[in-house]
Image (cartoon, rainbow, N blue to C red):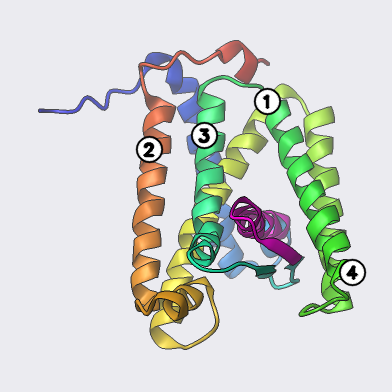
Amino acid sequence: MPINYTLAADAKPQVKLLLIATAVSIGLWVVGWYVPLIGYVVYPIQLFGTFIHESAHALATLITGGSVMSLTVSPDGSGMVWSQTSGIASLFVSSAGYMGTTLFGTLLLVWMRFGFKSRLALYLCSGLIAVMTVVFGFIAPFLNFLQNVTFFSVVFTVLSGAVLTAGLFAIAKFATDKWVNFSLAFLAVQCLLNAFFSLKTLFVITTSTEASSDAANMAAATGIPAVLWVVLWIAISLVMMAVGVRLYANRGIKAKQDTLFLD
């Protein structure tokens, strides 16, 4: 039975916005390979993606009844969550980073398509980064006597979290509607691209080195080769992206365009 993929008429403004955000995102990434200065432009977005990745690990730990000892973000854009989990819960926690980042980007797409307020989404993003920074980036490490982390890593995490929190809040509070809408679309695309390209990098690392990673943790816990976990995560991410884009363009959904595309 053929499937109708005709773009909904009321989704066209949103799809145009998403395409612009995607073009800008990819353009910055490509130009950044040749113009190092561009790296400073995308650096905060890279850190945002890391915060979302590590937040997913932390939330998965809490959902499964574990405890989070620390959440840190490093200047090179990597991150780490130290937690205490056991049994099958550890599998859920290890998978949560990449899957959570993809899910977050997909949910932002769905949020936009259903016409919920873009400013509210940015406020929520700001609040998420703030809570993760204060609770797991600052309080938790000191309660655990800086176990497995350094004082510098805590300082950088707190400073970067504070800057991201303030930046997202400022955009939500002071930017025009057009820039608020574009910022949310840009964040959605960045989360999806970050998750996909991070998985691609993880695939290369897993097949060529024995470096520690989420996939390596899964392999140690299950005996299933790490590369198979990476392939599975890539497949799941692609499915979530496809679902998100399909919902974004679905003619069966009535978007509240007046809340998304005011001039």
Q: Which amino acid does the dot numbered 4 rest on?
A: Phe
- Distance between mark 3 and mark 4 Cα atoms: 37 Å
- Distance between mark 1 and mark 2 Cα atoms: 26 Å
Residue at the spot of label 2: 243
Q: Could you say which disc has been placed on residue 142 in the image? A: 4
Instruction: Name the quarter where the N terminus is drawn.
Output: top left
Q: Quadrant of residue 86?
A: bottom right
Q: As drawn, which residue projects farthest toward the left? A: 1
Q: Could you say which disc has been placed on residue 109 in the image? A: 3
- First along the sequence among labels 4 and 1: 4
Q: Which segment did they paint magenta?
A: 43-71
Residue 206 x, y percent position in the rendering: 43, 80
Q: Which amino acid does the dot numbered 2 rest on?
A: Val
Taking the image as shown, residue 135 lies to the left or right of residue 67, namely right
Residue 154 x, y percent position in the rendering: 85, 69
- First along the sequence among labels 1 and 2: 1
- Circles 3 and 4, Cβ within 8 Å, touching? The answer is no
- First along the sequence among labels 3 and 4: 3
